[in-house]
Amino acid sequence: MKRLVFILFVIGTIGTGKAQDAKKFEYQEKGLNDYVVTKVEGKTADEIYASAFNWVKETYKNPDEVLKATIEGKKIRLTGVASNLLIVKNKYSFPLKYTVEIAVKDGRYKFEIFTIETPPNEYGNGADYKNIEGFKTKKSMVKNFGESPNRIENYFNDLNKSLKNYILSGSPGENDQDW
């Protein structure tokens, strides 16, 4: 009996560890994973924070409006809106409002998604698209939302990749030219 309990404990620990060590955003049965931790070797927490803050300033059209909270050298919280990610029945496109937090430590940062939701509109009060069960797997969801889960995953993975590239190179991306 003790052996069985030990084995179940080990399996539970391994399963939990994998969920916490996600390298990219991906919908599972219960919704999108909460965060990814990205390594940026050789960078201090202060360097990562400064780069992340500048990335927000360069990435968003109105950075002062999207920045919701900052704790100097530790965290940045922001809210943004993304268009053309949520398309229902291949006809209706809805914007998604999201809140993310970037927390920094030496050599790494955590990119955490708090919410992904549709703002209230003529169809209802809005909905949470982060914790939606079976978004990629239930037939009724796939029928109604098609590739929307993949678009949402790609959007946040690309956003995180853009941040990482900025931290490592000091520029927003490949379009930055030497003039």
Image (cartoon, helix red, strand yellow):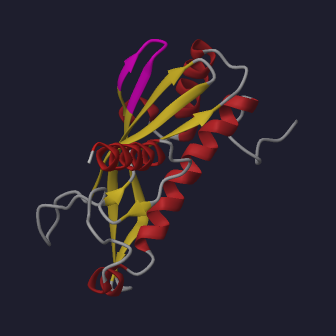
Residue at 48 percent across and 53 percent down: it is 25
Q: Quadrant of residue 63?
A: top left
Residue at 53 percent across and 25 percent down: it is 53
Spot occupied by residue 171 in the image (x, y as percentages of width and height): 71, 34
Q: Quadrant of residue 28?
A: bottom left
Q: Is residue 73 magenta?
A: yes
Residue at 41 percent across and 39 percent down: it is 112
Is residue 135 toward the left or the right of residue 76 in the image? left
Spot occupied by residue 86 in the image (x, y as percentages of width and height): 37, 69
Q: How many labels sit on residues?
A: 0
The one nearer the camera, 130 or 10, is: 10
User: Of helix, strand and loop, which mostly describes the magenta segment?
Assistant: strand
Q: Which residues are magenta?
A: 69-77
Residue 40's place in the image compared with 72, above or below, is below
The one nearer the camera, 8 or 81, is: 8
Is residue 30 toward the left or the right of residue 175 in the image? left
Residue 13's place in the image compared with 170, above or below, is below
Residue at 58 percent across and 52 percent down: it is 158
